[in-house]
């Protein structure tokens, strides 16, 4: 028997067939999903996302001085002028990516005007690799270990991450160890331990069992409590001075693969009716919010281990708190903000004078993740090892 490799002339004059077009290449370098940014931007106006100024800041009322009181007839009043407003600050962070190419690799890949047969577009593949790396980078940044030096400090370099804002630590202040900048004392320049600032803490709710065997310690009950704690309703009048409970971007519950599986198991086991079982993307929901599978949470080392200054992945069982976490996020109060003139801005082609055949094209982005409120988000976390359904 003679194989096709023996026919030398055939091999010289016959090219291979590539299955797809020159601008199609299966992208398995992407993360399994990059859901986080999409849900944070869901329902936002351009004015909510694109900003300017020297920094990103806003006012929040975390507490008020009690001046209302009962009084006796003709009793005099001592008038006060309390100033309860607090200013939070987010600092601009800068990130870039780029493509680099040479004239030779692009022009020799061009078939116009000659008989060259190309199988794939080199320019397409260069672009694909850059954007794949960019969105992988953003997903990792949004779930990075809280680092006070890199994230909270004015002269830091990194975006704030979701676990730096929403976490299960005391007062919501991360304790990732000296290697990650040490213990946090402020978040966006506000110290939740200061007098009157106690509401600058995420809502925290633990669960002690996947399925409640006695009492209300199961996962479903924990969601019940977390939703009640974050259900803020205005009074029956003067609603203009309060947050509206309607017409807000749809919230979501971010969790890992095991987190989604555990939630589904808990609902089924407790015979929940699942009135709104599916959202348009086929994801199970609780209270109108979908459980969103965040692949990055399967491996992110952002959770307390029980040892001071040591964080690890969520399923580590060397402590008594191994198990899935659930981040309940309201996009109106946790926003990815970009500089209005520097969102993936193309800085143009750069060609070094001593290598005129080599070119680069940087893409520049200025922005940060900012919390407009912390108490309106929740984290549901295990108080004992609950690692599987």
Image (cartoon, rainbow, N blue to C red):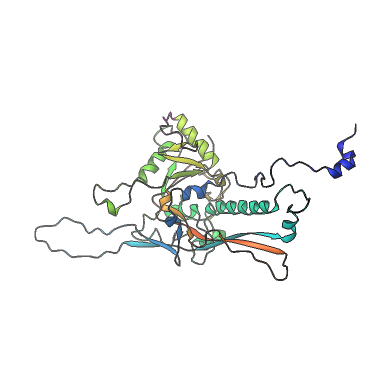
Name the residue located 11 percent from the left edge and 61 percent from the top edge.
75
Q: Position of residue 265 (x, y in %)?
A: 49, 32
Which one is in front, 294 or 102? 102
Q: Quadrant of the N terminus?
A: top right
Stretch of the chain drawn in magenta: 270-279
Q: Position of residue 255 (x, y in %)?
A: 50, 43
What number of labels is visible?
Answer: 0
Q: Position of residue 335 (x, y in %)?
A: 45, 54
User: Relative to residue 127, is residue 55 drawn left or right?
Assistant: left
Q: Is residue 362 visible?
A: yes
Which one is in front, 28 or 154? 28
Magenta stretch holds residue 348: no
Residue lying farthest to the bottom in this orientation: 353
Q: Main secondary structure of the magenta part?
A: loop
Residue lying farthest to the left in this orientation: 74
User: Relative to residue 64, is residue 45 drawn left or right?
Assistant: right
From what the image shows, is residue 224 above or below residue 372?
Answer: above
Instruction: Report which quarter residue 66 is drawn in.
Output: bottom left
Instruction: Report which quarter residue 82 is drawn in.
Output: bottom left
Name the residue located 63 percent from the left edge and 61 percent from the top edge.
361
Q: Is residue 183 visible?
A: no
Name the residue located 24 percent from the left edge and 65 percent from the top edge.
81
Q: Position of residue 85 (x, y in %)?
A: 33, 62
User: Relative to residue 33, is residue 371 drawn left or right?
Assistant: left
């Amino acid at each position: 028997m003679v194989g096709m490799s023996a026919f030398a002339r055939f091999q010289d004059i016959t090219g291979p067939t590539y299955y797809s077009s020159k601008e199609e290449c299966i992208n398995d370098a992407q993360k399994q999903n990059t859901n986080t940014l999409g849900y944070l931007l869901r329902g936002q106006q351009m004015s909510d996302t694109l900003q300017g100024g020297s920094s990103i800041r806003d006012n929040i009322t975390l507490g008020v001085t009690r001046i209302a009181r009962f009084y006796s007839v003709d009793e005099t009043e001592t008038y006060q002028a309390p100033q309860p407003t607090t200013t939070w600050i987010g600092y601009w962070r800068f990130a870039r990516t780029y493509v680099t190419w040479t004239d030779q690799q692009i022009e020799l890949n061009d078939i116009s005007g000659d008989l060259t047969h190309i199988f794939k577009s080199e320019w397409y593949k260069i672009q694909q690799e850059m954007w794949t790396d960019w969105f992988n980078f953003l997903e990792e940044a949004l779930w990075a270990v809280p680092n006070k030096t890199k994230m909270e400090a004015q002269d830091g370099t990194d975006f704030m991450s979701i676990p730096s804002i929403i976490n299960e630590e005391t007062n919501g202040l991360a304790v990732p160890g000296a290697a990650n900048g040490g213990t946090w004392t402020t978040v966006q320049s506000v110290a939740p331990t200061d007098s009157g600032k106690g509401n600058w803490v995420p809502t925290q709710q633990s669960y002690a069992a996947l399925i409640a065997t006695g009492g209300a310690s199961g996962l479903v009950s924990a969601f019940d409590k977390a939703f009640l704690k974050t259900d803020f309703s205005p009074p029956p009048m003067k609603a203009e001075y309060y947050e509206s409970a309607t017409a807000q971007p749809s919230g979501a519950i971010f969790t890992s693969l095991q987190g989604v599986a555990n939630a589904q198991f808990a609902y089924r086991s407790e015979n929940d009716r699942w009135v709104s079982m599916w959202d348009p993307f086929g994801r199970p929901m609780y209270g109108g919010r979908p459980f969103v599978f965040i692949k990055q949470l399967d491996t992110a080392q952002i959770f307390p281990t029980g040892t001071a200054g040591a964080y690890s992945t969520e399923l580590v069982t060397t402590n008594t708190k191994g198990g899935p976490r659930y981040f309940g996020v309201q996009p109106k109060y946790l926003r990815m903000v970009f500089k209005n003139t520097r969102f993936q801005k193309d800085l143009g082609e750069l060609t070094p004078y001593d290598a005129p055949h080599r070119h680069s094209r940087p893409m520049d982005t200025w922005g940060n993740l900012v919390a407009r409120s912390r108490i309106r988000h929740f984290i549901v976390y295990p108080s004992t090892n609950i690692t599987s359904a």
